[in-house]
Amino acid sequence: MREYKMRRGEHLEDRVPDMEAFVEEYFGEVTDTEEYEGNDLLVVDDPDNPVFDRVVAGRVEYGSKKDKLALHIDERPAEDVIAEGNVDAAEDAVAVKNDFLEEATDRDAKARRDSLKRSVEDDADAPDNV
């Protein structure tokens, strides 16, 4: 499960007031919920895009800190998707995921990558707890 931060000054609940409708708009009908760190995330067991096998998404609340968006996508093997003639769906899958994340977080793919790099560097600089 990957968690995504919001842009400074932005709050997830302001950008996505109805998480279920938002997830359904991008991935398909929500069929279940799944617990993650004390939060119920939405599950799409049969996503609209044939590349996606299963999608789990939702809001992760951290009390005094800003909420984050959690997203996990199980994808089908590329060979299977291509063999079924769904090459266009593979291209669309990348766009759907990026559009979903950008609309929710107001951060494009480059900003999300840079943030991830900074968090990895911060972890490397932290002293070991032995």
Image (cartoon, rainbow, N blue to C red):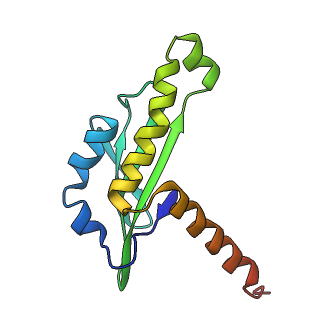
In the image, residue 19 lies at what x, y percent?
25, 54
Please state the total of marks drawn on the protein image: 0
Q: Quadrant of residue 67?
A: bottom left
| Residue 19 to residue 45: above or below | below
Q: Residue at x 36, y 86 (%)?
A: 64
> Which one is in front, 63 or 16?
16
Relative height, residue 16 to residue 90 (above, below): below
Q: Is residue 51 visible?
A: no
- The residue at the point 19 percent across, 61 percent down is 17
| Residue 53: x %, y % from top left | 47, 31
Residue 125 x, y percent position in the rendering: 74, 83
Residue 96 seen in the current view: yes
Horizontal relation, residue 73 to residue 29: left or right:
right
Q: Quadrant of residue 63?
A: bottom left
Residue at the (52%, 58%) spot, across then down:
2
Q: Position of residue 97 (x, y in %)?
A: 44, 44
Looking at the image, residue 19 lies above or below residue 27: below
Image height check: is 80 above or below 71? above
Quadrant in which the C terminus is drawn: bottom right
